[in-house]
Amino acid sequence: MSRSMKVTPSVISIKPTRMNFEFGNQVPHYWLDNDPFSTHFISVLSTFFPDGERFFVDSVRALRDKVSDKARQKEISGFIGQEAMHSLEHTSMNDMLEERGLPANKAAKTALSLLNFGRRFFGKRHQLAATVALEHFTAILAHRVLSDTELMNQFHETMRPIWMWHAIEETEHKAVAWDLYHDVKGHSYVERVAFMIIASSFLAVATAINQLRFMHADNQLWNLKTWAYGLNKLFGRRGVITGLTSDYLDFFKPSFHPWDHENSALVAYWREQLETAMNEAA
Ligand SMILES: [Fe+2]
Ligand SMILES: [Fe+2]
């Protein structure tokens, strides 16, 4: 077991679940905080998921033979299954966006070309390092969703379950790619950090471009009120991104491990809430 490795908390089990969420007319146009900017920001992230998660799965699958431990192999299978299910559900969600005249396919294509650049120019370990970096993003964002009740309540009830479910599972498997990376010969702190910087830059640029495309397609490009409101919600003093800074920077500590952010109790709590929400919807 390498120096940076910790065991996944025993209450956590990494199992895929097929949800079959429905995205019909019951979903309002602005389903997050009744706000264009906020809704489009999260929609843009959704367009990145199907191809992004396929990239994560491929990078983990390519190196899983470096692990012989049975429990770890089971975790890896759980990770692959969970990400595959996320891809499916987000594809349905993205189809809804496209049907509503939003450029979801175009946004996904931008992300895919960046990922394909990674596949072409980086080796297996480097691709896994990119996955580790992007999984850190999903983990800290998921933690925010699960720990900020006000934010969770801003999701319309028809859209809350998919984000709740995704956040739960991102937390459950947050250390799988990380642990695998640290089992691959040649891994290093410098490489891990370098790929975080590359991944952060790509993600920021792709998000900004597609936020503009979504706002334009929805005739909201010059709606300064929603820009001011949304940007403040992200980058203001109590903003979501501002609030993630310290969790993000923890990645740059040489001794960091994803379970240093011990939030397994949140997962147990929200699993129960999700079940209730799904039963009520049925
Ligand atoms: Fe995911
Ligand atoms: Fe993930």
Image (spheres, helix red, strand yellow):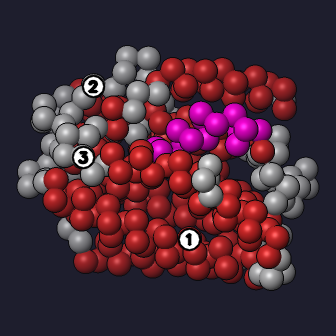
Pick whichever of labels 2 and 3 is earlier in the sequence. Answer: 2
**What count of labels does the image hold?**
3
Q: Measure how far apart labels 2 and 1 are at the Cα level.
A: 33 Å
Q: Which residues are magenta?
A: 139-153
Query: What residue does disc 2 label?
Result: 7
Any mark on residue 253, and which? Answer: 3
* Residue 138 screen position, x and y as percent: 48, 49
Name the kind of residue labelled 1 in the image: Thr
Residue placed at 53% from the left, 78% from the top? 110
* Residue 266 screen position, x and y as percent: 55, 25
Seen from the viewer's position, the closer of residues 65 and 10 is: 10
Q: Residues within 10 Å of mark 1 (few under 14, many from 20)?
A: many
Residue placed at 18% from the left, 61% from the top? 191
Residue 198 found in image quarter: bottom left
Residue placed at 82% from the left, 70% from the top? 225
One can see residue 190 in this view: yes
Q: Residues within 10 Å of mark 3 (few under 14, many from 20)?
A: few
